[in-house]
Image (cartoon, rainbow, N blue to C red):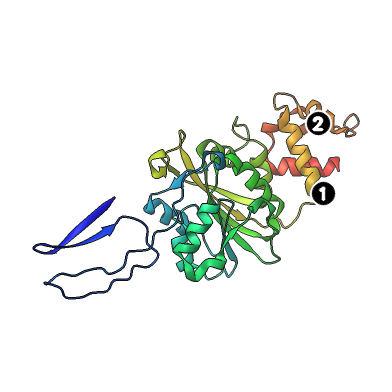
Amino acid sequence: MYGHKQIEEGCFIVFELWAVVESFATYSSQKGCVLISNKPQKLVKVKPKKKLGQHFLTDANIALRIVEALQEVDGSTVIEVGPGTGVLSQYLLNKYSQFLAFDIDDESIAFLKQRYPHHQEKFRKEDFLSYQFPEGQVSIIGNFPYNISSQLLFKIWENHQCTSQVVCMLQKEVAQRICASPANKQYGILSVLLGAFFDIEYLFDVGPRAFDPPPKVDSAVIRLKRNETKALPFDQEFFKSVVKAGFGQRRKTLRNALKPLNLPLANLADHMLIKRAEQLSVEDFIALTRKLS
């Protein structure tokens, strides 16, 4: 697709409507016309891939709101998960010197390295799910692919000790589950696990028209900020197994739902065991797990 701009009668600059790394123009006077002696360099074209769950954010205003939702980074490394075409990256690069972006899409990484030649080392062709977190603190941001958003959040939960905050866009239904309170059908495993280490905020909704291609569902942006709980008074994985078992059979009381874990429940008289998982707060689950450990 091409466009043109008239400079003076009979003279035009012709340009191609592609993303350009750097456009270099050489001007010469020939019959009063301004000419471009070399073509802008085309970037690698990034096509959204269904198998990767890609829906590229295209709304710059939404992108800026997401970036501005990161608070008090305090020197931590900012990590973007799934940068896609760089709609968030363009703001993050300007704002944070310690910035990294991870994507498993060859086209995306090639595109971003070509678009930002002076920051190529910051764009990594690497699966964030396999990333070894550093000893220092990180802040995580991104438009999380719908098909692995829960896996990404479990990864963050496992590395909560070095994650100061997370701002992410998710499928709206998933965001609502994470932010749900007890005694709510949406309240579930991630609500409890993430709530043990983070203060969770539901920020705003994002409609399908903000993406290419538009998803069939609405999206939402949430923020997780580390709370004061540095560690649980028992094994973290044991806590996860108790929570998962409880919600695995959420219509049963916890005494029955936890039976597959082969815990000594028969002699444990606790009022929480006669409740269903969705009736327990995060603090209740922590207290119950302490008694079971």
Decide: is 155 above or below 246: below
In the rendered view, would you say 97 is above or below 288? below
Q: Are dots 1 and 2 in contact, CB under 8 Å?
A: no
Q: Nearer the viewer, residue 82 or 274?
A: 82
Residue occupied by mark 2:
258
Helix, strand or loop status at disc 1: loop
Instruction: Find residue 246 and name its label.
Output: none
Screen quadrant of the C terminus = top right
Q: Going from the N terminus, do you reach mark 1 or mark 2 first?
A: 1
Please say whether residue 83 is visible from this viewpoint. Answer: no
271 sits to left or right of 144:
right
Residue 278: x and y, percent? 67, 32
Q: Label 1 belongs to which residue?
A: 235
User: What's under tag 2, amino acid-wise?
Assistant: Leu
Quadrant of residue 149 within the rendered picture? top right
Q: Nearer the viewer, residue 259 or 50?
A: 50
Q: In the depicted view, which residue is nearer to us: 225 or 276?
A: 225
The secondary structure type at the circle numbered 2 is loop
Determine the residue located farthest toward the left in the rendered image: 9
Percent from the top left, x then y, of residue 103?
Answer: 57, 53
Q: Position of residue 58 (x, y in %)?
A: 40, 49
Q: Is residue 205 above or below residue 94?
A: above
Q: Residue at x 53, y 66 (%)?
A: 120
32 up-or-down from 102: above or below: below
Residue name at image x 37 percent, y 53 percent: 61
Could you say where residue 72 lies in the image, as x and y percent from the top left?
54, 65
What separation in Å lies between label 1 and label 2 (alpha carbons)?
A: 17 Å
Name which residue lies at 71% across and 32% down: 247
Q: Is residue 152 left or right of residue 2?
A: right
